[in-house]
Amino acid sequence: MNECDILVIGSGAAGLTAALALAETRRVTVLAKGSLTGGSTAWAQGGIAAVLDAGDTFDNHIRDTMVAGAGLNRRETVEFVIERAPRSIDRLVELGVPFNTEGADLHLTREGGHSHRRIVHVDDATGWAVQEALLKAAQANPNITLLPGRSCIDLITGRHGEKFSGDGRIWGAYALDEASGRVERHVARATVLAAGGAGRVYQFSTAPRGATGDGIAMAWRAGARVSNMEMMQFHPTCLYNLEVKNFLITEAVRGEGGHLLHPETGRRYMTDYDAERMELAPRDIVARANDDQIKRYGLDYVHLDISHQPPEFVRQHFPTIHEKLAGLGIDMTREPIPVVPAQHYTCGGVLIGLDARTDLPGLWAAGECTESGLHGANRLASNSLLECFVFGEAAARDILAGWDDLPAPPAIREWDESRVTDSDEEVVIKQNWTEIRRMMWNYVGIVRTTKRLERAQHRIDLLAQEIQDYYGSFRVTTDLIELRNLHQCADLIVRSALRRHESRGLHFTLDYPETDAVARDTVLVP
């Protein structure tokens, strides 16, 4: 058994922000599935939205966020996050994040849905620079223990105590040590869930391999409510290449003047979908436009073209993308980029308040695994990393403020492996994984119908018993843990989608094309 003051699950922007704030006075253990840099933070190309320009205001940023979120945002959350954005940027500068500058000021770019330039960035690889700075600070902190290669199985509750309790309090997590194959007990007074999104529920996704909804699924099984799981964001522009999967072409390419074109006629088709904002419309609108063009004309992809800009401008603003595409024989300074929509961000998740508290005592949460009220029905570009910093700090602040009132953990039972054996049919995991992801893409994608959702629900129900039987019979592996969580999240997404009888933001259904006058969250209760 490993015991610490606070357990943080996830080593991305949200988890490390919380850990650094908590470690000023407490001992913190950070668990990471796979490598410490394997989460979505390192993959973020775009940047971080903050009001830093003299012509911009908090009200502008708030309004843009609410418009993109189709009114489903909670205004108090939007204000809370956006007003704290400049301070978060200052903190990152202190940590050594080398943001691009323009003279004495930070260089600001613009992305879809934003009325002003307000995106601070490090070329087109902001996430990696942020991840590197946070990790360097965490590694240098003697109060932080970083443990990579830990796949969390379930949150520890009072039900796992040697003396049973049904109070619902969280005392840490059971985690598989991927190297040894042993299951460890990580016990703590407080636990911060920062385990990322559920993008890999879909066949095509820009999310990293480990984005299997682990935090959402664990919290749900432990008794926490989840909200707005039907709001899955699809990025409009993922590179179409049969050899290279999941390579994102950042929103900023459109923000800096990129045009979307029909690949056969060369027509700039966004005039048909949003004539005023064109390529700078929010992501849900652009993703649906791209999807419509591909399906209507039987295309494999559409074109994203920024070759009308000076070559040096393109290379300077998008060095990572330019280099990657050049290696594939595409010169983005001279020719268009073939792109398709792909799942990109989980806007729903574990329900939290402004203090980052979940429904469960002893459990706080931050980042993509949560539904804080910031994103509503569609995340505004570059608000995601911002949410991680603000709620990572909010969780730490709340935990430290109430530290003296947090009880000490009880004795926790060891993980029981007495009735399981090593698996002799790994093919079952691969088959179920593939089936779920393909079914979710085809039936629960960008455009939905009730009939398709019901078909998806039927298949999810059929798989439930098969996966549970497998889980109950064999020793856990990372693949099995992920399959179980993937299935759980697929179920939550479909159930939420079936409940929403309107089209709003990312949830677009042909059976209910109108938007209700009143915006309501879809909250599921375990």
Image (tube, grey):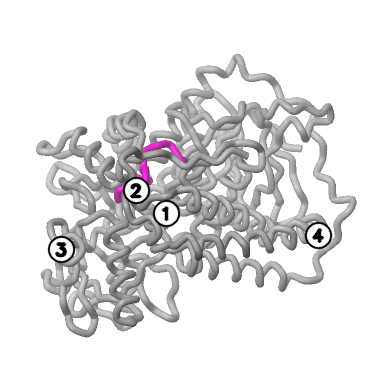
Q: Which residues are magenta?
A: 371-384
For marks 1 and 3, give the one nearer the viewer: 1
The answer to whether one can see residue 15 in this image is no
Q: Check disc 1 and report the residue beneath it.
A: 345
Q: Residues within 10 Å of mark 2 (few under 14, many from 20)?
A: many
First along the sequence among labels 2 and 3: 3
**Residue 379 circle label:** 2
> CA gap, disc 2 to disc 3?
21 Å
- 345 w.r.t. 203: above or below: above
SS under mark 1:
strand
Please say if the residues under marks 1 and 3 sit with CB atoms less than 8 Å apart.
Answer: no
Where disc 4 sits, the SS reads loop
**Foreground of the two, 366 or 297:** 297
Q: Which residue is mark 4?
A: 474
Using the numbered discs, state the Cα–Cα distance from disc 1 to disc 3 in whole angstroms.
23 Å
Q: Position of residue 257 (x, y in %)?
A: 15, 63
Q: Which mark is residue 509?
A: none
Residue beneath label 3, please?
257
Q: Are marks 1 and 2 in contact (CB under 8 Å)?
A: yes
User: Label 4 vs label 3: CA separation?
Assistant: 53 Å
Placement of the C terminus among the 4 image quadrants? top right
